[in-house]
Amino acid sequence: MKFSLLTLGALAFSAQQASLVRGEGDNTSGQQAKDGVCNPNSSLSFNITRAGESVLFTCSETVSNLDPAFSDTIPEMYEGNSKVRILEFLPGATLQKVETTGESRSSG
């Protein structure tokens, strides 16, 4: 199933789950690392193929408006040209906005 997400905000999980997504921890849950950066006038697409998979993405500082707007209670995405509720497709999904600093984005 392919989902096209148009700059929804920074999607992340708890610190433990985020480290699993990045491959920094014990990857026993079957999560695979996937990440991307959203930019103005472009969309991000992810393929979610099984339960327990995680997607982590960030938005560049040049993204001032999100479409659809971020909502942690009723998260939305685009399927083609139509806005749909993520929970209709992925009932157990979570969408969280995480504000980051330059320190947390450094690699090493």
Image (tube, rainbow, N blue to C red):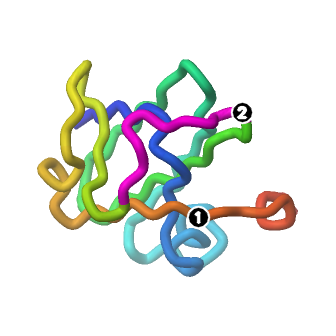
Q: What is the quadrant of residue 28 in the picture?
A: bottom left
31 left or right of 88 in image: right
Q: Are marks 1 and 2 in contact (CB under 8 Å)?
A: no
Q: CA distance from mark 1 to mark 2?
A: 16 Å
Question: Magenta-highlighted stretch: main secondary structure?
Answer: loop
Q: Residue placed at 29% from the left, 45% from the top?
A: 76
Q: Residue at the spot x=71%, y=62% of the render?
A: 100
Location of the C terminus by quadrant is bottom right
Report the magenta residues as a range: 62-71
Percent from the top left, x then y, of residue 50? 25, 54
Reading the image, the residue beneath label 2 is 62
Question: In the shown orientation, is residue 102 left or right of residue 16?
Answer: right
> Could you classify mark 2 by the number of other residues whose Cα lies within 10 Å: few (under 14), some (14-19), or many (20 or more)?
few
When the figure is inspected, residue 70 is found, relative to residue 102, above or below; the finding is above
Residue 28, compared with residue 72, is above or below; it is below
**Which residue is depicted at the point 78% across and 58% down?**
105
Residue type at tag 2: Thr
Name the amino acid, label 1.
Answer: Val
The picture quadrant where one finds residue 64 is top right
Which residue position holds label 1? 98
On the image, the x and y values in percent for residue 88 come to: 12, 50
Q: Nearer the viewer, residue 92 or 27?
A: 92
Q: Quadrant of the N terminus?
A: top left
Residue 67 part of the magenta segment:
yes
Secondary structure beneath label 1: loop
| Spot occupied by residue 25 in the image (x, y as percentages of width and height) | 61, 77
Reading the chain from its start, which is encountered first: label 1 or label 2? Answer: 2
Residue pictured at 38% horizontal, 74% vertical? 29
Q: Residues within 10 Å of mark 1 (few under 14, many from 20)?
A: few
In the image, residue 90 lies in the stretch drawn in magenta? no
